[in-house]
Each structure stands twice: as structure tokens, then as C-alpha cells.
């Protein structure tokens, strides 16, 4: 074979090899993107999630509605950023019941992925001790009987919010940036935006039985663990998770929403 023929055949062989290799390479590339890339993305997601944030708690499958029926599943999986008080508030149960039902030894030691029972035997909280000696006509003075000196958290027109036919909270209309005050002295047990339907929310514990909540604020001025004095400014009015500027205010006794007007001083 002459030198020219040899180089011609070698060049032809190379071209044939390239032509055969290209479809194979394309097929391998396609398979890589169809199989390998999703797997790698999945690994990446496992590495990056969950996001470390105290104020983010995405809840699925167990929505909570501020008006109407509260959906309370039998169990709940703790998400990153959850707190025991926040979970109890979301599902309308007493945080002390959660502690007993789930044998929790430390309120600060719940962990992501932990399954909490939300139902158990009802525990008496001394209702007779608080109300047993009171005559029905004096129930209008429940604020005094609670042992807490209550005050209105904001100024403005009010609208009662009903749940199962009973008043469970108040909407207090105002202007954006208006001050929001603590309704009584206590300790901040939740300050964040992880509870669906409440926007920027603050929960204050006043004693073992009573808590109050302040929702939809534009800005929160206190953080969890802060000790709050009476009538202290804790937030600015806004419209987070709300169609209008207002404060949504609740008082809960032993985990259950009560009519705030029965505790707040008359005259607003």
C-alpha cells in the first residue's frame, strides 16, 4: 500500500470512528441528564435543607384558620423554627398538655422531625378555683379574677371575631405604624412569622394559664425571652397576612381562646 493510500485509509477510519462515537456520546449525555443530574440535585437539596431560621416554619397538611374551624390533627411533626408555645397556639391546645402527653422534660428541647401527640386526656386546670366562688353576675369582671391587670393593646374601632359561635378574638383597626402595646406584663414566648394566617406574630405568656397574641404587625420590637412590662410598646401595626391594616388580638386561657372583652377594661 502506498503512503498516500495509507494516510487516506487512516483519515477515513478516523472519520468513521467520529461518526460512530457522536451518537454514542449524545446518548450517554442524555442519560446523564435524565438520571445523574436529578440524583445530584436531590443530594444537593438534602445538603442545603432545611434552612436555619427561627422564623420559618412551613406547614403542610394541617392548616390553621384564624376564623371558623381550627383543624387539629392527632399528631404533628416538628419543623425547624417551631417552638412548643407556637405549636400549642397553632392548634389551640395548652402547652402544658403537650408537655405531659409527649413526656417533654425541657420546653426548649423539641427537635426537627419529632412527632408530637396533639390529643390526650383532658387535664383540669383549676377552673373551679378561679370561677367557683364567683356569681354569674360578676363574671363581667374576669380580668380582676384572673389576677392580671389587663389593658387595651391598641386604639381604634374593634370588630369581634367569632369561632364556633363564640367570640375568640378582636380586630382593632388602625393606621400603618400605629403602636401596639402589651396587654399585660409577661414574657415573650413567640416572636416570628411561622404561623400561617397570623403574619408577624407575638405571643406573651402572663402566667401559667393566660397568654395573649398580637398578629399582622408591620414590625416586631421584641424577641423571644424578653420580659415585657405592662403597656410596653411591642410592635407596629401593619397588614401582614391580612387585607387591611389592623391588630388581631387574642387572649387564651389554658390554650383555649376566650372573649377578650370580658378581660379588658370597659371603655377601650
Image: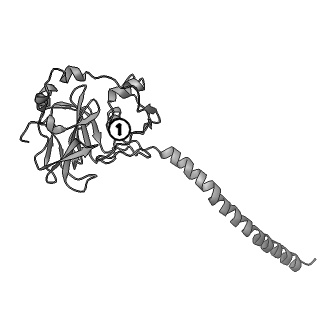
Position of the C terminus by quadrant: top left
Q: Quadrant of residue 33?
A: bottom right
Residue 140 sits in quarter: top left
Residue 247 picture location, percent across and down: 19, 47
Q: Secondary structure at mark 1?
A: helix
Does residue 142 appear in the picture of this structure? yes
**Mark 1 crowd level (few <14, some 14–19, many ≥20, 10 Å Cα):** many
Q: Residue at x 43, y 31 (%)?
A: 117
Residue under label 1? 91
In the rendered view, would you say 249 is above or below 35?
Answer: above
Looking at the image, which residue sits at the far front? 136
Q: Extreme left residue here?
A: 267
**Which residue lies at the image location 7% right of the left edge and 38% below the top edge?**
266
- Residue 167 or 194: which is nearer the viewer? 167
Instruction: Specify the color scheme.
Output: one colour
Q: Is residue 143 visible?
A: no
Say how many tags the image has. Answer: 1
Amino acid at each position: 500500500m502506498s503512503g498516500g493510500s495509507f494516510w487516506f485509509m487512516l483519515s477515513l477510519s478516523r472519520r468513521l470512528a467520529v461518526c460512530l462515537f457522536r451518537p454514542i456520546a449524545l446518548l450517554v449525555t442524555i442519560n446523564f441528564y435524565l438520571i445523574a443530574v436529578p440524583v445530584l440535585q436531590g443530594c444537593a437539596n438534602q445538603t442545603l435543607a432545611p434552612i436555619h431560621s427561627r422564623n420559618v416554619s412551613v406547614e403542610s397538611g394541617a392548616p390553621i384558620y384564624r376564623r371558623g374551624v381550627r383543624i387539629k390533627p392527632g399528631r404533628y411533626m416538628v419543623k425547624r423554627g417551631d417552638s412548643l408555645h407556637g405549636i400549642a397556639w397553632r392548634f389551640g391546645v395548652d402547652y402544658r398538655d403537650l408537655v405531659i402527653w409527649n413526656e417533654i422534660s425541657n420546653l426548649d428541647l423539641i427537635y426537627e422531625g419529632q412527632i408530637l401527640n396533639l390529643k390526650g386526656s383532658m387535664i383540669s386546670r383549676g377552673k373551679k378555683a378561679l370561677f367557683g366562688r364567683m356569681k354569674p353576675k360578676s363574671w363581667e369582671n374576669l380580668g380582676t379574677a384572673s389576677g392580671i391587670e389587663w389593658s387595651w393593646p391598641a386604639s381604634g374601632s374593634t370588630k369581634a371575631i367569632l369561632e364556633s359561635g363564640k367570640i375568640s378574638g378582636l380586630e382593632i383597626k388602625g393606621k400603618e405604624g400605629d403602636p401596639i402595646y402589651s396587654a399585660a406584663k409577661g414574657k415573650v414566648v413567640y416572636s416570628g412569622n411561622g404561623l400561617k394566617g397570623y403574619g408577624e406574630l407575638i405571643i406573651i405568656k402572663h402566667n401559667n394559664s393566660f397568654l395573649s397574641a398580637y398578629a399582622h404587625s408591620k414590625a416586631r420590637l421584641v424577641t423571644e425571652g424578653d420580659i415585657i412590662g405592662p403597656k410596653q410598646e411591642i410592635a407596629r401595626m401593619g397588614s401582614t397576612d391580612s387585607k387591611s391594616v389592623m391588630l388581631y388580638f387574642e387572649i387564651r386561657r389554658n390554650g383555649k381562646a376566650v372573649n377578650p372583652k370580658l378581660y379588658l377594661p370597659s371603655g377601650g
